[in-house]
Structure formats: structure tokens, C-alpha cells
Amino acid sequence: MLLTRFRSRPSGRPAMVVAGLLLSASPAFADPSPALDRFSLSVGGFSADPKLNASFGTAYGALQTGDVKPGRVTMPRISADVLLGDSQGISFDYYRYKREYSGGVDSSTSLGPFGTLNTFGNANISTKLDFAKLSYKWWIGSGNTVLGLGAGAAYYRATLGTTALASVNGQVGTLSESSSGSTVAPLLEIGVRHAITPDLRLFADASGVWKSSGRFHGNIYNASAGVEWFPVKNVGVVLAYGVTNIDLTRENDFADSRLKVRLQGPSAFLKARF
């Protein structure tokens, strides 16, 4: 009996099918939204018209300044964003507020059985706040509009000082006080990005820092909105308008010191993206 063996030649089609299945099973990495950059660095300034209210803790009680307007100030500011993958990233921001005020102060504080602390004439008030924050962000969406949610930590250091002419129970003298402190506090952020075109984008951001305990505590809230325009591919300008509310308390041995500042005004930045 004659047996004939037939050897079939592999067609290659099964291998192509298997390869297609493997590719379909592997995760797909989409391009990030045109509203986001892989990496960006912004350097500029915040031109604010501050409103200040300070309370200085002294051995004789708290000295209140009342609401004062020390005049417009421009604060240096730097920020950076790094995108990890397509929907997560790290954000950094730093600014410094520093202002001195010299003007008329007329304050009277009751010391209970010890009498009254009176200040009059001119007083010199110096304030400085260094603020830095680092957060991890999740971006929701892949089209022209994305929503960002962030959580992280903020570091701030505040210094508050005054020199004023004061009297206690009729004894007149120069009152000079200074208080400073620094701490780390939790941070929450939310933001929206919208790309009209890849070179023209809108944004809005809000963040809050809050610490309720410790010797140095308080809150800092910020909100801003603006536009980004890139006349060339990797370099552009950012114009924004923002409001920042600062309310910090430093507990002292005699009386607490408190700094309340409201900053409101425009910002301008030079932004590089890659």
C-alpha cells in the first residue's frame, strides 16, 4: 500500500493573528491633551495691591494695626510642571511677599488690671512671607479640556515686625517687636485647562493650604485665571489675574501675633515648554 505524505507550507496567517491579539491586549498610551505640556517652566511676577491687618504680640498685650494699604508690590514667582505618563504629573510653585509700611497708627488695647497699651504717631511695619508648594496632580480627560485634581504639601515662613511709639500707664517709650515662624501644611488643588489651539490656551486654578494646630498655623487660599499664548513653538507668555488670602497666627508667650494679607492683581510670566 502506497502512502503519500503531504507537508503543508505554513501560511503565516496564524502568526499575524496572534501578533494582532497581543498588540490589542497591551495597554495603549494616548497622546496627552493639547492643553498640557510634558514639561514647562514659568518665571515672572505678581503685581498685587495688598491689604494688610497685623496683630503683634508684646509683653504688654496685642498691638493691632487695623486695615492698612501699604501700596502696590511686585512679587517674583516661579512655577514648573512635569507630566508623568499622559494623565498624572508633579507641580511646583514658589513666590515671596515682602513689604514695609510706615504710616500713622492710633491704637488702644486694654490690658485688664494692668492698664491700657496706647500707640500713636508713626509706626514701621515689616512683613515677609516665603511660600512654596509641591503637589501631585491627576488630569481627567484627553480632549481639548481637562480637569486637574492635586494633593501635596506647602512650606511657608513668615516674619512680622514693628517699631512704634507707645505708652503704658502714662509711661512713653519705643515699642519694638518681631515674630517669625515656619511650617509645612497639607495642600489641595483643582484646575481646568482648555486648548483653543495648541498655541492658545485658557486656564483656571484654585488651591488651599490649611493647618489648624501647632504653634504656627493658619490658612492660605489662592485663585487665578488667565491665558497662555505661544508665538513660537516652545516659548510663550502667560497673563493672569489672581487673588490670594493669607491668614497666619504665631503663638507667643505673652500674646499671639497674627498676619492677614489679601493680595489681588495681575501676573505676567515667560513660559518655556517641551
Image: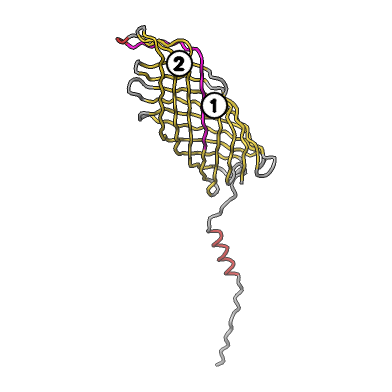
Residue 61 in the image, given as x and y percentages of width and height: 36, 16
Count of numbered badges drawn on the protein: 2
Taking depth in this image into account, of 57 and 82 the one nearest to the observer is 57
Question: What amino acid does circle 1 point to?
Answer: Val
| Residue at the extreme bottom of the image, as rendered | 1
Label 1 CA crowd tier, 10 Å (few <14, some 14–19, many 20+): some
Question: What amino acid does circle 2 point to?
Answer: Thr
| Residue at the extreme front of the image, as rendered | 173
52 in relation to 181, above or below: above
Report the magenta residues as a range. Answer: 93-111
| Residue 106 falls within the magenta-colored stretch | yes
Q: Which residue is mark 1?
A: 243
Residue lying at 41% horizontally and 12% vertically, measured from the top left: 166
Q: Which residue is mark 2?
A: 65
195 in relation to 218, above or below: below
Mark earlier in primary sequence (1, 2): 2
> Which colour assignment does the render follow?
secondary structure
Residue 147 in the image, given as x and y percentages of width and height: 55, 38
Tell me if label 1 and label 2 are in contact, CB under 8 Å. Answer: no
32 in relation to 58, above or below: below
Q: Which mark is residue 133?
A: none
Residue lying at 58% horizontally and 66% vertically, measured from the top left: 17
Q: Give SS at disc 2.
A: strand
70 in relation to 39, above or below: above
Which quadrant holds residue 28?
A: bottom right
Residue 229 in the image, given as x and y percentages of width and height: 66, 37
Q: Main secondary structure of the magenta part?
A: strand
Residue lying at 51% horizontally and 35% vertically, measured from the top left: 94
Taking depth in this image into account, of 26 and 64 the one nearest to the observer is 64
Residue 77 in the image, given as x and y percentages of width and height: 55, 34
